[in-house]
Image (cartoon, rainbow, N blue to C red):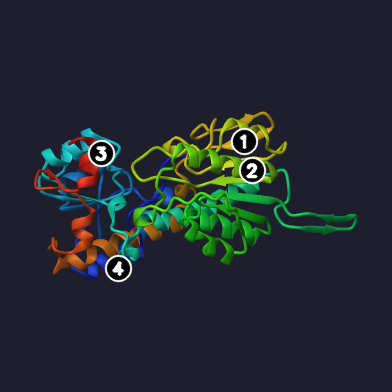
Amino acid sequence: MGERRLCVVPDVVRKYRELGAQLLMQSGAGVSAHLGDDMFADVRFAASAGEVFAAADVVLCVQPPRTESIAAMKPGSVLLGLLQPWSSEERVRLFMERGITAFAMELLPRISRAQSMDILSSQGAVAGYECALIAADHSPKFFPMLTYAAGTIRPAKVLVIGAGVAGLQAIATARRIGAMVEAYDVRPETREQVESLGAKFIDTGVAAAGSGGYARELTDEEKAKQAERLARAVAQCDALITTAALPGRPAPRIIGADMIARMKPGAVVVDMAADTGGNVEGTVAGDKVWINDVLVIGPTHIPSRMPVHASEMLAKNLFNFISPFIRDGALALDWEDEVISGSCLTHAGEIRHPGVKQALGL
């Protein structure tokens, strides 16, 4: 399943129009999100994506644009969306060569004011919800307790690894379905959030709280200690959902083949990090594989499984980011604003984000 989300929805289009902005969309762009052209009032349609890139002063995107699309953009135009800033030196160089002001929403500062703009969190919530449903759909067991004429069936036990936005949503969804849920995160401060959702927090004795709300990488000794305790919990669960990710880096390998070998026959693993290498040894991105008698699922484009609400959330995030700087239909960026300066990837032919610059060696 490919990308089905859209970066504007009809309600948000009206908000842009109220600010005096003109909107240009590729005809049919919203069909995969069940949003036909006739649902968008006061929008001008172009026959191709190339026409949109060539004509727009500000381009909103879901995924990073292709090379030919970047080449078609106006010099000095603005690009805003999920740009995967760490993944392609070539793409960043093209932004600089074209003089494009690119804002990568992955770089959004983790401050209170930016929460309404946080695409990673909104789309993470969608992904966590979907992964719980994928696990329930593929499990050979009922998730909730079931009482029937001949007795009672115990609820399935679900283990969620990672208690960020995605993990917490997976926990909440699995609990609503009726499963018994345990969860683990290397950040000890997440215990209270996990327990508030009715799940049991697994304490491995390893704490790895990092900056910006993310976890730091573990030492080899910490990884061994974590693996020993986790292995026991993994062996006891009926469904395992992994959500651990490090921005700009491959997903940390948490579940090894030895852990999979100890799982119950018929157990299900859903690896949310399949796109970036996976948390589970043996995960194949975009596929389902049997390892012994354990089903390991590596879903990709997970938020696109629910394109209507995922698009609505994403469109509002982008609007909340850019709308304060649209005045009388014109864009006036405030470079003193922490959100603007902190999210900027490239501007005026230069790379502006020091972390990305260092990571790409530019």
Closer to the chain start, of discs 2 and 3, is: 2
Using the rendered view, name the quadrant where residue 108 is placed: bottom left
| Real-space CA distance between mark 2 and mark 3, rounded to the nearest whole angstrom | 34 Å
Asked whether, in this view, residue 230 is left or right of residue 221, the answer is right
Disc sitting over residue 113 in the figure: 4
Closer to the chain start, of discs 3 and 4, is: 4
Asked if the residue under mark 3 is in contact with the one under mark 2, i.e. CB atoms within 8 Å, the reply is no
Identify the residue under disc 2: 234
- Secondary structure beneath disc 2? helix
Identify the residue under disc 3: 359
Percent x, y of residue 255: 55, 37
The image quadrant where one finds the C terminus is top left
- Secondary structure beneath disc 4? helix
- The answer, for residue 127, to whether it is visible in the render is yes
Percent x, y of residue 152: 84, 56
- Secondary structure beneath disc 3? helix
Asked if the residue under mark 4 is in contact with the one under mark 3, i.e. CB atoms within 8 Å, the reply is no
Using the rendered view, name the quadrant where residue 231 is placed: top right
Closer to the chain start, of discs 3 and 1, is: 1
| Real-space CA distance between mark 3 and mark 1, rounded to the nearest whole angstrom | 32 Å
The mark tally for this picture is 4
Identify the residue under disc 1: 259
Percent x, y of residue 241: 57, 46
Using the rendered view, name the quadrant where residue 232 is placed: top right
Residue found 43% across the figure and 45% down from its top: 245
Asked whether, in this view, residue 143 is left or right of residue 216, the answer is right
Residue found 49% across the figure and 37% down from its top: 253
> Is the residue 93 above or below the residue 209 in the image?
above
Closer to the chain start, of discs 2 and 1, is: 2
Q: Along the line of sight, which residue is nearer the eye, 260 or 275?
A: 260
Asked if the residue under mark 1 is in contact with the one under mark 2, i.e. CB atoms within 8 Å, the reply is yes
Closer to the chain start, of discs 4 and 1, is: 4
